[in-house]
Amino acid sequence: MRIGITCYPTYGGSGVVATELGMELAARGHEIHFISYAPPIRMNPNDPRIHFHEVEVASYPLFDHPPYTLALATKMLEVFESESLDLLHVHYAIPHSVSALLARSMAAPRRLPFITTLHGTDITLVGSNRSYLPITKFSIEQSDGVTCISNYLLKETIKDFDIKRPIEVIPNFVNCDLYNRTADKGLAAQWAPGGEPILMHLSNFRPVKRVPDVVEIFAIVRGAMPAKLILVGDGPDRGAAEFLVRKYGLQKDVLFLGKQDNVYEKLAAADLFLLPSQLESFGLAALEAMACEVPVIATNVGGVPEVVEHGVDGFLVEPGDVGEAARYAIEILSRTDRGREMGKIARLHAKKNYCANDVIPAYESYYKRVLEQS
């Protein structure tokens, strides 16, 4: 198939999943065309089956904000015509599904079906805002196919938007061959030369991720034992996290890596992963850590309990409860095996439910059903 994929090309989960999906599909012989304002952060530009089409938005004094939705729709139509696309797959409802709807209308009477994948904040935050709710609901209902990443998000979408059409749950996934414990390239020894346990957090550092809580948790852990904290990513809350590191005098034990490629190499060096988010519709970073045999301490919110089983492959706490999270962290890292047994169970869970080898065929099957029906 020839598939157009549109996503936010940034560090967020929706863009990561969309990019990984495109690369997995390309590996299975499909032609993938990414359509966005910048190359997705994890896209492999050297794959001959992966192509990037930049959406250029002209600035004009009349517009306070560049009309990206319209420029994207035009580029979608252009790529459909030049590359003979079979379908569009847009990730994140706003504004991508609206642009796809416009592109499909402009392509008529030629057939250009599109699938919308809902990832979380497009429903829980943006879509439920009254100013966006009607257009989000309309674009979901007008999509030729709709998927979402967790059972939690399915329930929220139906509840908030009163959606009557069928929505397929296809979960996020991880390449289990790539994400594994042996992926560490000597980073653990580099970051913790004294053999200290390594705690890690990976996100886009938005307020919903509660990155300052990560530092608060680590400060308590560090008060009980030698340890290192590795923070992967960047975003608006980095400054707040850096302030807390200085406040607690943790500069020698905390490392800010910024945005990184090949995150599996970093995750494989960790002993414990922290995800204290206010809300997660799935928890992709937790899954990636689990595939690398890293136990997870996360918050009991949204779709996270579908990924992390409390007391089995990690622990769940309430948002903001840094004391409880730190207690669990100390418990894990104080064990004679430093949580390795729990980490192995985490990988078994990831392999059983969320490997790309199992999830990608579900997308392929869904594409075929949509093409047959539209």
Image (cartoon, grey):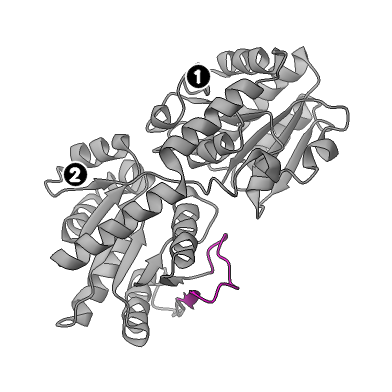
Magenta stretch bounds: 39-54
In depth, the one of 174 and 279 nearer the eye is: 174
Q: In x, y percent, where is residue 273? A: 61, 31
SS category of the residue bearing label 2: helix
Quarter containing the N terminus: bottom left
Q: Residue at x 26, y 37 (%)?
A: 156
Nearer-N-terminus badge (2/1): 2
Q: Quadrant of residue 231?
A: top right
- Which residue corresponds to mark 2? 161
Disc assigned to residue 312: 1
Q: In x, y percent, where is residue 192? A: 83, 32
User: On the rendered structure, is 178 left or right of 336?
Assistant: left
Mark 2 surroundings: few (<14), some (14-19) or many (≥20) residues within 10 A: some
In depth, the one of 190 and 95 nearer the eye is: 190
Magenta: main secondary structure: loop
Q: Nearer the viewer, mark 2 or mark 1?
A: 1
Disc assigned to residue 190: none
Q: Which residue, as the protein is rendered here, is positioned at the far bottom? A: 82
Tell me which amino acid carries mark 2.
Answer: Phe
> Is residue 296 among what the camera can see?
no
In depth, the one of 25 and 172 nearer the eye is: 25
SS category of the residue bearing label 1: loop
Examine the structure image and report whether residue 26 is included in the region drawn in magenta.
no
